[in-house]
Image (cartoon, grey):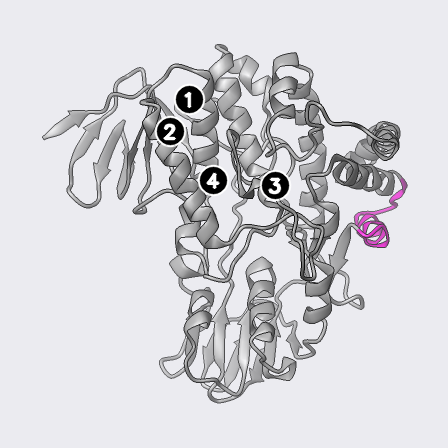
Amino acid sequence: MTRTMDADYLVVGAGAMGMAFTDALVDHADVRVAVVDRRHSVSGHWLEAYPFVRLHQASAFYGVPSTLLGGGQLQRSGPEEGLQERASQAAICEYYARALDRMVESGKVEFFPNTEYVGGRTVVSQVSGQRYELPERCRIVDAHYLAPSIPAEKPPPFAVDADARVVAVNALARIEHAPRQYVVVGSGKTATDACIWLLSRGVDPDAICWVRPREPWMMNRAVVQPDPVIFLGMVADTMHAAEQASSLDDLFLRLEDAGIMLRIDRTVLPTMAKAPTLATWELDQLRTLQNVVRRGHLAAVGPGRLVFGDGSVAVASDAVVVHCAADGLKYPPLVPVWRPDAITLQPIRSGFPCFGAALVGYVEATRDDDAEKNRLCPPTPYGNSTADWARMNVLGARAATSFSAEPDIAEWASRVPLNPARIPPGHPGSEALDRARERLAAHAPPGLARLAELV
């Protein structure tokens, strides 16, 4: 039997963006929302993430707008003392479970786990087979347009011989017999986490081979913090560097000199700029790994050998190859957020997807005209290459100018910790903050103009 689902909105995907949108929408509109996800609970890919993962950014920048993740606590000891805490996988999943409970208790939200939206305004349970039809008034919200791919859910992008030992990064925490060598495959945040975790467990740096198809630029975690002096100062320094840059490579080298960008090997100029954050203590440890293979993407793994397009590399016969090579972030074409067939969630301010989804939820709740909503919230892409990163910042700055010009949005955004550029109400101010704002005002216009030229 097919049932009718009583909902004004169907949110497809209960990960970070779907939850942020829903939270903002139901806080500002009297609507009924059905949230569906193919997984067994909320939290999206975090349910399947490797157990030693942490947010690469401050917890305050992640989650739903109504509730601060982690309580805004600073780390009191360790190599990141003084920086805001970064939530663990377990803490993130618990946080989203509590957020869902609050939404359901409001009477406005109903959650359907293990359920797929199959198109045609039809939802189907993967477990029971129950089918639901959506009323005509119900708007579809696509919250998985940018859903990341992770190693636990995607096979390695290279061939694996039957006798080779290849594991997803999740399996590292369950290794029972130490091999003579670990081979970490991937250039991004997952690969750096795997290397740091192996080193933390006493693995000799010489027993780790790191296959890096591309060299990555990463952001210094110390300058991506919720403190407005720090964050606005970083943006001002970025715009100043862009203003003076003669090329994209020159821009990134200037950002490195300013302490904003980091690269693992200073003898190689990176081309990859997804730019997750990295701490300097992690950078120091990663630089102890000398066996780095830079021969492009891995084609195949066999016992004792790695095969590339231009030949092979020998490794230990019992080597454990750690698959960290899922493509992670997605780069589909930018589309208008509001279209007749769907609301497609995408970042708005550069690089902060939870804030972007929450902003879309707030605008949906407070505006009626889709054309006006799209004017206020033009989407931005994620960074991948250095040109992509520059384009992301140009589009993100233009979007911030658009939505910040609306008094109610500016006031709402100032109260939402997800907004990295906010100055909270009641902030005491300081000479340092005044200087950061003055520098940003001086360098942003010419810096953005130069970034647009470089792109």
Give the main secondary structure of the magenta stretch: helix
The residues tagged by marks 4 and 2 sit, at their Cα atoms, a distance apart of 15 Å
Which residue has dot 3 on it? Answer: 72
Residue 310 visible: no
Q: Say which amino acid is labelled 1.
A: Val
Q: Residue at x 69, y 57 (%)?
A: 80
Q: Earlier in the sequence, mark 4 or mark 1?
A: 4
Pair 3/2: label in front: 3
Q: Position of residue 64 (x, y in %)?
A: 50, 34
Q: Are marks 4 and 2 in contact (CB under 8 Å)?
A: no
Range shown magenta: 244-259
Q: Position of residue 120 (x, y in %)?
A: 27, 28
Residue 279 visible: yes
Q: Say which amino acid is labelled 4.
A: Ala
Q: Identify which residue, 80 or 441, lies in the foreground.
A: 80
Is residue 260 shown above or below 294?
A: above
Which residue has dot 2 on it? Answer: 103
Q: Residue at x 29, y 21 (%)?
A: 7
Whether residue 245 is in magenta: the answer is yes
Q: Identify which residue, 347 or 15, lies in the foreground.
A: 15
Q: Is residue 122 left or right of residue 101?
A: left
Which residue has dot 4 on it? Answer: 16
Q: Residues within 10 Å of mark 4 (few under 14, many from 20)?
A: many
Q: Identify which residue, 316 or 257, lies in the foreground.
A: 257
Q: Secondary structure at mark 1?
A: helix
Q: Position of residue 427 (x, y in %)?
A: 73, 27
